[in-house]
Image (cartoon, rainbow, N blue to C red):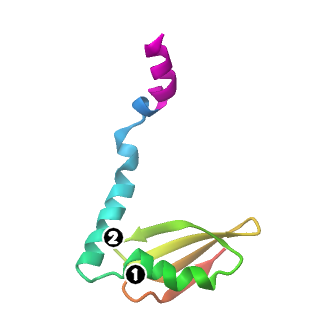
Amino acid sequence: MRILLFLAAFGPALLASPGDARPREREQMSAWKGTQEGRFLSLRTIEGLIVPRMRGADYLGPELDAGSGRYRLKFMRAGEVIWVDVDARTGAVLGQSR
């Protein structure tokens, strides 16, 4: 009986592919290395610059393209997704799309 309860609770997690998290892990490692090397501002710094400008929008999270040195911050306002592209080196807004 205990094994059935265990499998019911954790079975889906045991079947998940370990490769599912790898792109996110690589993105996080690139961000960390870039920050440590002084190539990128910290995500916390960038969020501190951008999130207050997006009044009335919920912040959903970041993505990093380490190759181009851009963060893409995702927001939601009134059911609409808003992407804000930010230079990871300077914190300057490069563009915004809906």
Residue in the picture at 39% in, 37% down? 17
- How many numbered discs? 2
- Circle 2: is it few (<14), some (14-19), or many (20+) Cα within 10 Å? many
Residue in the picture at 39% in, 57% down? 24
Q: Residue furthest right?
A: 78
Query: Looking at numbered disc 1 in the image, what kind of residue is underneath it?
Result: Ala
- For the residues labelled 1 and 2, the Cα–Cα distance comes to 9 Å
Q: Position of residue 57 (x, y in %)?
A: 68, 74
For marks 1 and 2 on the same chain, the one whose residue lies earlier in the sequence: 2
The magenta segment is 1-12
Q: Position of residue 68 (x, y in %)?
A: 37, 77
In the picture, measured across the screen, residue 29 lies left or right of residue 43, that is left
Which label number is shown at residue 46?
A: none
In the picture, measured across the screen, residue 65 lies left or right of residue 35, that is right
Quadrant of the drawing holding the C terminus = bottom right
Q: Residue furthest top?
A: 1
Residue 3 lies in magenta, yes or no? yes
Query: Which element type, helix, strand or loop, lies under badge 1?
Result: loop
- For residue 57, above or below residue 10: below
Residue 16 lies in magenta, yes or no? no
Main secondary-structure element of the magenta-colored stretch = helix
- The quadrant holding residue 91 is bottom left
Q: Looking at the image, do the residues carrying marks 1 and 2 touch, with CB atoms under 8 Å apart?
A: yes
- The quadrant holding residue 20 is top left
Query: Looking at numbered disc 2 in the image, what kind of residue is underneath it?
Result: Ala
Q: Position of residue 16 (x, y in %)?
A: 42, 35
Q: Which residue is mark 1?
A: 88
Residue in the picture at 38% in, 49% down? 21
Task: Between residue 88 and residue 5, name the one nearer to us.
Answer: 5
Q: Position of residue 85 (x, y in %)?
A: 51, 79
Q: Which residue is mark 2?
A: 31
Query: Which element type, helix, strand or loop, lies under badge 2?
Result: helix
